[in-house]
Amino acid sequence: MKVFVVSQSGREIIKGGLDLHDSATVSDLQEAIHGRRKKCYPSRQRLTLPLQPGSKERPVVLNPKKKIQEYCHENFNNLTVVLKDLGPQVSYRTLFFWEYLGPLVIYPIFYYFPVYQFLGFKGDRVIHPAQTYALYYWCFHYFKRIMETFFVHRFSHATSPLSNVFRNCAYYWTFGAYIAYYVNHPLYTPVSDLQMKVGFGLGLVCQISNFYCHLILKNLRCPDGGGGYQIPSGFLFNFVTCANYTTEIYQWLGFSIATQTVASYVFLVVAACIMTNWALAKHRRLKKLFDGKDGRPKYPRRWVILPPFL
Protein backbone atom coordinates (compact mmCIF):
# COMPACT_ATOMS: atom_id res chain seq x y z
CA MET A 1 0.00 0.00 0.00
CA LYS A 2 1.24 3.47 -0.91
CA VAL A 3 0.44 6.41 1.36
CA PHE A 4 1.09 9.95 0.15
CA VAL A 5 1.66 12.57 2.85
CA VAL A 6 0.86 16.17 1.97
CA SER A 7 0.65 19.48 3.82
CA GLN A 8 -2.55 21.49 4.27
CA SER A 9 -1.61 23.45 1.14
CA GLY A 10 -1.30 20.21 -0.85
CA ARG A 11 2.51 20.17 -1.03
CA GLU A 12 4.03 16.70 -0.85
CA ILE A 13 5.92 16.38 2.43
CA ILE A 14 7.53 12.98 1.90
CA LYS A 15 8.72 12.60 -1.66
CA GLY A 16 7.43 9.45 -3.34
CA GLY A 17 5.14 8.58 -0.41
CA LEU A 18 5.46 5.67 2.01
CA ASP A 19 5.14 1.96 1.31
CA LEU A 20 3.26 0.10 4.06
CA HIS A 21 1.86 -3.41 4.33
CA ASP A 22 -1.85 -3.86 3.72
CA SER A 23 -2.66 -4.52 7.39
CA ALA A 24 -0.80 -1.42 8.65
CA THR A 25 -2.51 0.82 11.18
CA VAL A 26 -2.49 4.60 11.36
CA SER A 27 -0.03 4.22 14.24
CA ASP A 28 2.33 2.37 11.88
CA LEU A 29 1.95 5.24 9.43
CA GLN A 30 2.86 7.76 12.14
CA GLU A 31 5.99 5.78 12.99
CA ALA A 32 6.91 5.65 9.31
CA ILE A 33 6.51 9.42 9.03
CA HIS A 34 8.67 9.83 12.12
CA GLY A 35 11.31 7.64 10.51
CA ARG A 36 11.50 10.02 7.54
CA ARG A 37 11.04 13.24 9.54
CA LYS A 38 12.76 12.81 12.91
CA LYS A 39 11.41 16.04 14.39
CA CYS A 40 7.81 15.02 13.72
CA TYR A 41 7.28 12.31 16.34
CA PRO A 42 3.82 10.65 16.47
CA SER A 43 2.28 12.88 19.17
CA ARG A 44 3.13 15.95 17.06
CA GLN A 45 1.21 14.57 14.09
CA ARG A 46 -2.42 15.25 13.23
CA LEU A 47 -3.42 13.16 10.22
CA THR A 48 -6.63 13.88 8.34
CA LEU A 49 -8.24 12.95 5.04
CA PRO A 50 -8.07 15.67 2.37
CA LEU A 51 -11.21 17.72 1.73
CA GLN A 52 -12.59 18.78 -1.61
CA PRO A 53 -11.82 22.42 -2.53
CA GLY A 54 -14.44 24.76 -1.09
CA SER A 55 -15.80 22.14 1.32
CA LYS A 56 -16.96 23.48 4.68
CA GLU A 57 -17.05 20.08 6.37
CA ARG A 58 -14.68 19.20 9.19
CA PRO A 59 -11.83 16.92 8.06
CA VAL A 60 -11.85 13.30 9.23
CA VAL A 61 -9.09 12.78 11.80
CA LEU A 62 -7.37 9.39 11.50
CA ASN A 63 -7.55 7.18 14.57
CA PRO A 64 -4.12 5.66 15.39
CA LYS A 65 -5.77 2.36 16.39
CA LYS A 66 -7.58 1.83 13.10
CA LYS A 67 -6.20 0.19 9.99
CA ILE A 68 -5.31 2.47 7.10
CA GLN A 69 -7.52 0.47 4.74
CA GLU A 70 -10.57 1.57 6.71
CA TYR A 71 -10.02 5.05 5.28
CA CYS A 72 -9.52 3.84 1.69
CA HIS A 73 -13.03 4.20 0.29
CA GLU A 74 -12.19 4.02 -3.42
CA ASN A 75 -8.66 2.75 -4.00
CA PHE A 76 -7.30 0.18 -1.57
CA ASN A 77 -3.79 0.48 -3.04
CA ASN A 78 -3.07 4.08 -2.13
CA LEU A 79 -4.23 6.84 0.20
CA THR A 80 -3.46 10.52 0.56
CA VAL A 81 -3.37 12.01 4.05
CA VAL A 82 -2.86 15.58 5.25
CA LEU A 83 -0.21 16.06 7.93
CA LYS A 84 -0.34 18.95 10.38
CA ASP A 85 2.62 19.44 12.72
CA LEU A 86 1.14 20.26 16.14
CA GLY A 87 4.46 21.51 17.45
CA PRO A 88 6.37 20.39 20.58
CA GLN A 89 4.23 18.29 22.90
CA VAL A 90 4.31 17.28 26.57
CA SER A 91 2.29 14.65 28.40
CA TYR A 92 -0.77 15.81 30.30
CA ARG A 93 0.74 14.46 33.50
CA THR A 94 3.75 16.73 33.00
CA LEU A 95 1.47 19.69 32.27
CA PHE A 96 -0.72 19.15 35.33
CA PHE A 97 2.21 18.43 37.64
CA TRP A 98 3.94 21.74 36.89
CA GLU A 99 0.79 23.83 36.98
CA TYR A 100 -0.21 22.40 40.39
CA LEU A 101 3.29 22.36 41.88
CA GLY A 102 3.57 26.15 41.65
CA PRO A 103 0.65 27.01 43.98
CA LEU A 104 1.65 24.18 46.33
CA VAL A 105 5.13 25.72 46.76
CA ILE A 106 4.33 29.42 46.47
CA TYR A 107 1.54 29.64 49.05
CA PRO A 108 3.58 28.36 52.06
CA ILE A 109 6.34 30.86 51.26
CA PHE A 110 3.99 33.72 52.20
CA TYR A 111 2.97 31.89 55.40
CA TYR A 112 6.34 30.69 56.72
CA PHE A 113 8.89 33.22 55.44
CA PRO A 114 9.30 36.97 56.19
CA VAL A 115 8.07 38.00 52.76
CA TYR A 116 6.26 41.06 54.05
CA GLN A 117 9.37 42.45 55.74
CA PHE A 118 11.07 42.53 52.36
CA LEU A 119 7.99 44.32 51.01
CA GLY A 120 8.33 47.11 53.60
CA PHE A 121 6.02 45.96 56.41
CA LYS A 122 7.78 46.58 59.75
CA GLY A 123 5.13 45.67 62.30
CA ASP A 124 4.75 42.43 64.21
CA ARG A 125 2.83 39.74 62.43
CA VAL A 126 0.09 37.80 64.22
CA ILE A 127 -1.00 34.57 62.56
CA HIS A 128 -4.72 33.91 62.96
CA PRO A 129 -6.24 30.41 63.01
CA ALA A 130 -8.08 31.14 59.74
CA GLN A 131 -4.72 31.73 58.03
CA THR A 132 -3.33 28.45 59.34
CA TYR A 133 -6.42 26.48 58.29
CA ALA A 134 -6.32 28.19 54.90
CA LEU A 135 -2.73 26.96 54.46
CA TYR A 136 -3.72 23.38 55.31
CA TYR A 137 -6.76 23.56 53.02
CA TRP A 138 -4.78 25.02 50.11
CA CYS A 139 -1.92 22.52 50.35
CA PHE A 140 -4.29 19.58 50.73
CA HIS A 141 -6.15 20.65 47.58
CA TYR A 142 -3.08 20.92 45.35
CA PHE A 143 -1.40 17.84 46.79
CA LYS A 144 -4.64 15.98 46.06
CA ARG A 145 -4.64 17.31 42.49
CA ILE A 146 -1.08 16.12 41.88
CA MET A 147 -1.85 12.66 43.28
CA GLU A 148 -4.98 12.45 41.11
CA THR A 149 -2.89 13.40 38.07
CA PHE A 150 -0.60 10.39 38.52
CA PHE A 151 -2.95 7.81 40.02
CA VAL A 152 -6.56 8.64 39.07
CA HIS A 153 -6.93 10.60 35.84
CA ARG A 154 -7.01 8.87 32.46
CA PHE A 155 -6.52 11.14 29.50
CA SER A 156 -8.27 10.92 26.14
CA HIS A 157 -5.27 12.62 24.49
CA ALA A 158 -1.71 11.57 25.21
CA THR A 159 -0.13 14.99 24.94
CA SER A 160 -0.73 18.73 25.02
CA PRO A 161 1.14 21.55 23.24
CA LEU A 162 4.22 22.70 25.15
CA SER A 163 2.91 26.27 25.06
CA ASN A 164 0.06 25.22 27.38
CA VAL A 165 2.60 24.59 30.14
CA PHE A 166 3.60 28.25 30.16
CA ARG A 167 0.01 29.48 29.85
CA ASN A 168 -1.37 27.23 32.61
CA CYS A 169 1.56 27.83 34.94
CA ALA A 170 1.15 31.59 34.51
CA TYR A 171 -2.53 31.24 35.48
CA TYR A 172 -2.11 28.99 38.51
CA TRP A 173 1.15 30.42 39.83
CA THR A 174 0.00 34.04 39.53
CA PHE A 175 -3.30 33.39 41.28
CA GLY A 176 -1.48 31.33 43.92
CA ALA A 177 0.79 34.27 44.77
CA TYR A 178 -2.10 36.76 44.54
CA ILE A 179 -4.30 34.86 47.01
CA ALA A 180 -1.42 33.91 49.32
CA TYR A 181 -0.32 37.55 49.58
CA TYR A 182 -3.68 38.77 50.87
CA VAL A 183 -4.70 35.80 53.02
CA ASN A 184 -1.35 35.76 54.86
CA HIS A 185 -0.91 39.55 55.05
CA PRO A 186 -0.06 40.98 58.52
CA LEU A 187 -3.07 43.33 58.25
CA TYR A 188 -5.46 40.48 57.41
CA THR A 189 -8.67 40.59 59.44
CA PRO A 190 -10.20 37.13 59.99
CA VAL A 191 -13.90 36.35 59.76
CA SER A 192 -15.95 35.08 62.68
CA ASP A 193 -15.24 31.61 64.00
CA LEU A 194 -18.64 30.38 62.77
CA GLN A 195 -18.13 31.71 59.24
CA MET A 196 -14.68 30.15 59.09
CA LYS A 197 -16.00 26.75 60.15
CA VAL A 198 -18.92 26.90 57.70
CA GLY A 199 -16.63 27.89 54.83
CA PHE A 200 -13.95 25.29 55.42
CA GLY A 201 -16.58 22.65 56.23
CA LEU A 202 -18.34 23.26 52.92
CA GLY A 203 -15.01 23.28 51.10
CA LEU A 204 -13.82 20.03 52.66
CA VAL A 205 -17.06 18.20 51.81
CA CYS A 206 -16.74 19.44 48.23
CA GLN A 207 -13.07 18.38 48.02
CA ILE A 208 -13.98 14.84 49.05
CA SER A 209 -16.95 14.85 46.65
CA ASN A 210 -14.68 16.11 43.88
CA PHE A 211 -12.30 13.20 44.45
CA TYR A 212 -15.18 10.73 44.22
CA CYS A 213 -16.39 12.37 41.00
CA HIS A 214 -12.92 11.88 39.52
CA LEU A 215 -13.04 8.19 40.46
CA ILE A 216 -16.36 7.85 38.62
CA LEU A 217 -14.93 9.53 35.53
CA LYS A 218 -11.87 7.29 35.69
CA ASN A 219 -14.04 4.19 35.47
CA LEU A 220 -15.72 5.52 32.31
CA ARG A 221 -12.42 5.21 30.43
CA CYS A 222 -10.33 2.24 29.43
CA PRO A 223 -6.85 2.04 31.03
CA ASP A 224 -5.33 3.39 27.81
CA GLY A 225 -7.54 6.47 27.95
CA GLY A 226 -9.87 5.29 25.20
CA GLY A 227 -13.43 4.10 25.28
CA GLY A 228 -15.21 7.03 23.63
CA TYR A 229 -17.94 9.12 25.23
CA GLN A 230 -20.30 7.60 27.74
CA ILE A 231 -23.10 9.02 29.84
CA PRO A 232 -21.66 9.61 33.33
CA SER A 233 -23.89 8.35 36.10
CA GLY A 234 -23.84 7.79 39.82
CA PHE A 235 -23.52 10.17 42.78
CA LEU A 236 -23.88 13.83 41.67
CA PHE A 237 -23.65 12.87 38.00
CA ASN A 238 -27.27 11.71 38.23
CA PHE A 239 -28.21 15.39 38.52
CA VAL A 240 -25.35 17.42 36.99
CA THR A 241 -23.46 16.80 33.73
CA CYS A 242 -20.14 18.16 35.03
CA ALA A 243 -20.36 17.35 38.73
CA ASN A 244 -16.55 17.41 38.96
CA TYR A 245 -16.56 21.08 37.96
CA THR A 246 -19.50 21.78 40.29
CA THR A 247 -17.64 20.47 43.31
CA GLU A 248 -14.48 22.29 42.22
CA ILE A 249 -16.31 25.62 42.10
CA TYR A 250 -18.14 25.13 45.38
CA GLN A 251 -14.98 24.06 47.20
CA TRP A 252 -13.39 27.40 46.23
CA LEU A 253 -16.59 29.13 47.32
CA GLY A 254 -16.07 27.52 50.74
CA PHE A 255 -12.46 28.74 50.82
CA SER A 256 -13.59 32.25 49.89
CA ILE A 257 -16.28 32.29 52.59
CA ALA A 258 -13.75 31.16 55.20
CA THR A 259 -11.00 33.64 54.23
CA GLN A 260 -13.12 36.47 52.76
CA THR A 261 -10.58 38.20 50.55
CA VAL A 262 -11.18 39.90 47.23
CA ALA A 263 -8.36 37.81 45.73
CA SER A 264 -10.06 34.49 46.50
CA TYR A 265 -13.39 35.69 45.09
CA VAL A 266 -11.70 36.95 41.92
CA PHE A 267 -10.11 33.52 41.47
CA LEU A 268 -13.49 31.89 42.12
CA VAL A 269 -15.24 33.98 39.45
CA VAL A 270 -12.51 33.48 36.82
CA ALA A 271 -12.30 29.72 37.46
CA ALA A 272 -16.11 29.39 37.41
CA CYS A 273 -16.31 31.18 34.04
CA ILE A 274 -13.65 28.93 32.51
CA MET A 275 -15.20 25.72 33.80
CA THR A 276 -18.70 26.84 32.80
CA ASN A 277 -17.54 27.23 29.19
CA TRP A 278 -16.04 23.73 29.31
CA ALA A 279 -19.21 22.32 30.88
CA LEU A 280 -21.55 23.92 28.32
CA ALA A 281 -19.45 22.49 25.48
CA LYS A 282 -19.43 19.01 27.03
CA HIS A 283 -23.17 19.14 27.75
CA ARG A 284 -23.94 20.06 24.12
CA ARG A 285 -21.60 17.33 22.87
CA LEU A 286 -23.22 14.64 25.02
CA LYS A 287 -26.74 15.71 24.05
CA LYS A 288 -25.75 15.57 20.38
CA LEU A 289 -24.14 12.12 20.70
CA PHE A 290 -26.93 10.62 22.80
CA ASP A 291 -29.97 11.92 20.94
CA GLY A 292 -32.14 8.82 21.28
CA LYS A 293 -32.02 8.09 17.54
CA ASP A 294 -30.93 4.92 15.72
CA GLY A 295 -30.85 2.92 18.94
CA ARG A 296 -28.68 5.41 20.82
CA PRO A 297 -29.72 6.25 24.39
CA LYS A 298 -31.17 9.69 25.03
CA TYR A 299 -29.20 11.96 27.31
CA PRO A 300 -31.23 12.56 30.48
CA ARG A 301 -32.36 16.00 31.60
CA ARG A 302 -29.73 17.41 33.97
CA TRP A 303 -28.23 20.61 35.26
CA VAL A 304 -25.07 21.58 33.38
CA ILE A 305 -22.76 22.74 36.17
CA LEU A 306 -24.19 25.14 38.75
CA PRO A 307 -27.53 24.03 40.18
CA PRO A 308 -29.90 25.74 40.72
CA PHE A 309 -28.61 28.42 38.30
CA LEU A 310 -27.32 26.53 35.26
Image (cartoon, rainbow, N blue to C red):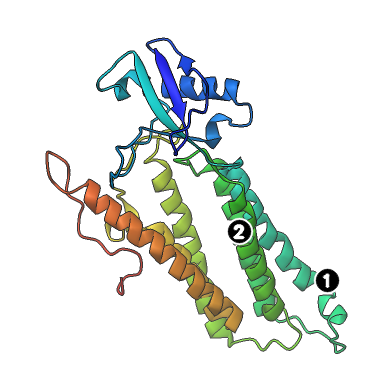
Q: Position of residue 221 (x, y in %)?
A: 39, 38
Q: Quadrant of the C terminus?
A: bottom left
Q: Secondary structure at mark 2?
A: helix
Left of 114 or right of it: where is 223? left
Q: Nearer the viewer, residue 237 or 228?
A: 228
Q: CA distance from mark 1 to mark 2?
A: 27 Å
Q: Quadrant of the N terminus?
A: top left
Q: Nearer the viewer's eye, disc 1 or disc 2?
A: 2
Q: Position of residue 268 (x, y in %)?
A: 51, 73
* Residue behind mark 2: 167
Tell me if residue 67 can be seen. Answer: no
Q: Position of residue 52 (x, y in %)?
A: 29, 37
As drawn, 35 above or below 141 = above
Amino acid of disc 2 = Arg
What residue is rendered at 29% in x and 50% in y? Answer: 233
Along the polypeptide, which appears first: circle 1 or circle 2?
1
Left of 263 or right of it: where is 292? left
Q: Nearer the viewer, residue 137 or 172?
A: 172
As drawn, 232 above or below 304 = above
Q: Quadrant of residue 43?
A: top right
Tell me if residue 174 can be seen. Answer: yes
Residue sitting at the far top: 21
* Residue behind mark 1: 113
What residue is rendered at 61% in x and 47% in y? Answer: 162
Count of number-bearing discs: 2
Q: Residues within 10 Å of mark 1 (few under 14, many from 20)?
A: few
Q: Quadrant of residue 90?
A: top right
